[in-house]
Image (cartoon, helix red, strand yellow):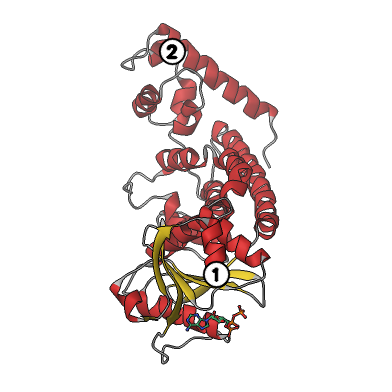
Amino acid sequence: MPDITPAERQARLRRYQALLAPGTPLREGLERILHGRTGALVVLGNTRKVERVSTGGFGLDVQFTPTALRELAKMDGGIVLSSDFERILAAGVHFVPDGTIPTVETGTRHRTADRIAQQTGIPVVTVSASMSTIALFLDGQRHQIEQSEQILSRANQALATMTRYRERLGEHTRSLSTLEVHDQVSVKDVTKVAQRIEMIRRLESELRAYVAALGVDGRLLQMQLYELTQGVDDLATLLELDYRPEQTDEATFRVGALEQLTSTELLENLVVARTMGFPDDHHLETRISPRGHRQIAHLDRIPSMLGRRVVEHFGSLQALFGAKTSDLMEVDGIGEGRARLVREGLARVAESAYSDRVD
Ligand SMILES: Nc1ncnc2c1ncn2[C@@H]1O[C@H](COP(=O)(O)OP(=O)(O)OP(=O)(O)O)[C@@H](O)[C@H]1O
């Protein structure tokens, strides 16, 4: 395969995993072959390069159906599908890829599949008669196509971890809110929230891969994932708006920058602080004050544009806490009703902070 970025490689893998996910016609055909205890070698597309490594067999060009695939797999040799996977173009094909292409596979079916995929750039799926497994050969790598139960058990573990991460994120943001009211936030308190956001994002990407591989069996998981990740991106944005140092621009202060860290680095608060863009003169204990975006965004019935305007007018959460209804009415778009809503909302935030303990 010509040079492709790791992200493109990942996207390509996801696309083929989705094609092979439970519930798709291709997966159904492969499952039938698996349960019939025969094997198969299926080339997922037809190009000049594929033709060049194909010999013998029967030209068919018939509609793809799971049953047809299962029946044709009984023949010796491999099967070629059209590039849109809608038609079976040939069966009983003997493939002769370049024998010098390195492969770690042992059986002839799997060695051939690996080499065809490497030589032509077209993915190949195998069903192993002896091992009862389905594998996808793509970009020089073998990917096991697992049964839903196996994927689900790992996905459920990841989901349980995600639930714990989400709880911890909730604890850290509540504690941040309390500290904000007392104007006692330090760099460390913000990095702790950012670190949890990044951990959730990492796990989310793992769980998305499970959802893709599970196909129809992944619907419940998808809904649970949606619930658990809701609001996380907004939180990251609000954190950036609240704590971006004066002299720093938007591109240099980003929670998203944490994606470049290794999992060990992500646990180091100081590394997190530097990576997300706190300047060198900020230490973990350096006091910082929020502008108030996050607190205003959580107030009911205040549209976000208006909320931003209020924050920009006052400049800091502390100034907002000190604002009277008449001060708030100086902001364009804020009448007496909304000014009261903001006042009462902020008073509730302050009250709940005084009833919470800060740890
Ligand atoms: N070059 C090839 N072209 C097409 N089909 C092939 C080729 N080589 C092997 N096969 C298919 O694979 C079948 C079994 O091969 P073999 O058992 O050696 O491979 P394997 O990789 O160990 O597969 P399995 O795990 O299914 O036993 C052959 O009967 C044939 O249908």
Q: Is residue 61 above or below residue 352?
A: below
Residue 179, position in %: x, y? 58, 37
Residue 336, position in %: x, y? 41, 7
Mark 1 and mark 2 lie on one chain; the one further toward the N terminus is 1
The residue lying at 44 percent from left, 32 percent from top is: 293
**CB atoms at circles 1 and 2 under 8 Å apart?**
no
Quarter of the figure that contains the C terminus:
top right
The residue lying at 68 percent from left, 48 percent from top is: 164
The residue lying at 52 percent from left, 41 percent from top is: 232
Specify whether 177 is left or right of 159: left
Ligand 1 image position (quadrant): bottom right
**Residue 192 seen anywhere in this rendered image of the structure:** no
Secondary structure, mark 2, is helix
Residue 74, position in %: x, y? 57, 71
Residue annotated with mark 2: 339
The residue lying at 29 percent from left, 74 percent from top is: 48
Quarter of the figure that contains the N terminus:
bottom left
Taking depth in this image into account, of 175 and 72 the one nearest to the observer is 72
Residue annotated with mark 1: 73
Residue 240, position in %: x, y? 42, 43
Kind of residue at badge 1:
Ala
Q: Local crowd at mark 2 within 10 Å, few (<14), some, or many (≥20)? A: many
**Residue 59 seen anywhere in this rendered image of the structure:** yes
